[in-house]
Image (tube, helix red, strand yellow):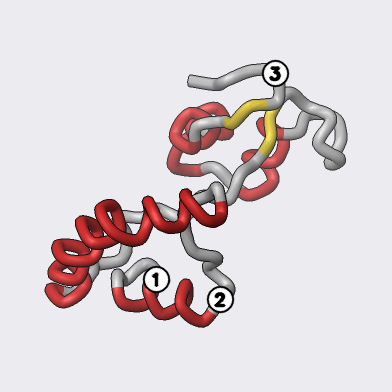
């Protein structure tokens, strides 16, 4: 199924239209961008990493059990009260540590 008007195209449908199992790179690009290689067609190509590809360790899952309630009950209200926003910048040292601890990075 395709989503029109410059939204995203579903991979299986694009491959099916490009020739199924025998699809080449060129045929897939022709389906996505007909007549020109500049993206003037009706579809965009998005890079999407499947979050279920990586297997998290048991420690990452256990860290979610204690970190999520503490964050929701203690850290988030204080951040919202003082900053007006909730969350960590993933580029900061504490943000990188939390993402690594939870297996997201």
Q: State the residue position of label 3.
A: 5
Q: Left or right: 31 with respect to 93?
A: right
In primary-sequence order, the first of circles 3 and 2 is 3
Q: Secondary structure at mark 1?
A: helix
Secondary structure at badge 3 equals loop
**In the rendering, at what x and y percent does residue 98 appear?**
37, 73
Percent of width and height locating residue 55: 24, 67
In this view, the residue in front, 80 or 58, is 80
For residue 73, above or below residue 22: below
Q: Is residue 4 left or right of residue 64?
A: right
Q: Position of residue 18 (x, y in %)?
A: 58, 33
Q: Which residue is mark 2?
A: 92
Tell me if mark 1 has few (under 14), some (14-19) or many (20+) residues whose alpha carbon lies within 10 angstroms of its own. some
Q: Is residue 60 above or below residue 42?
A: below
At a point 65% along the width and 41% down the height, the residue shown is 45
Mark closer to the observer (3, 2): 2
């Amino acid at each position: 199924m395709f989503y029109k008007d410059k939204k995203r195209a579903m991979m299986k449908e694009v491959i099916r239209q490009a020739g199924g199992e025998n699809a080449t790179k060129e045929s897939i690009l022709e389906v996505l961008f007909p007549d020109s290689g500049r993206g003037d067609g009706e579809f965009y190509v998005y890079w999407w990493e499947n979050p279920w590809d990586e297997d998290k360790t048991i420690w990452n899952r256990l860290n979610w059990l204690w970190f999520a309630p503490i964050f929701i009950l203690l850290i988030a209200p204080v951040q919202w009260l003082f900053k007006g926003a909730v969350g960590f910048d993933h580029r900061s040292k504490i943000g990188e540590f939390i993402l690594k601890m939870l297996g997201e990075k």
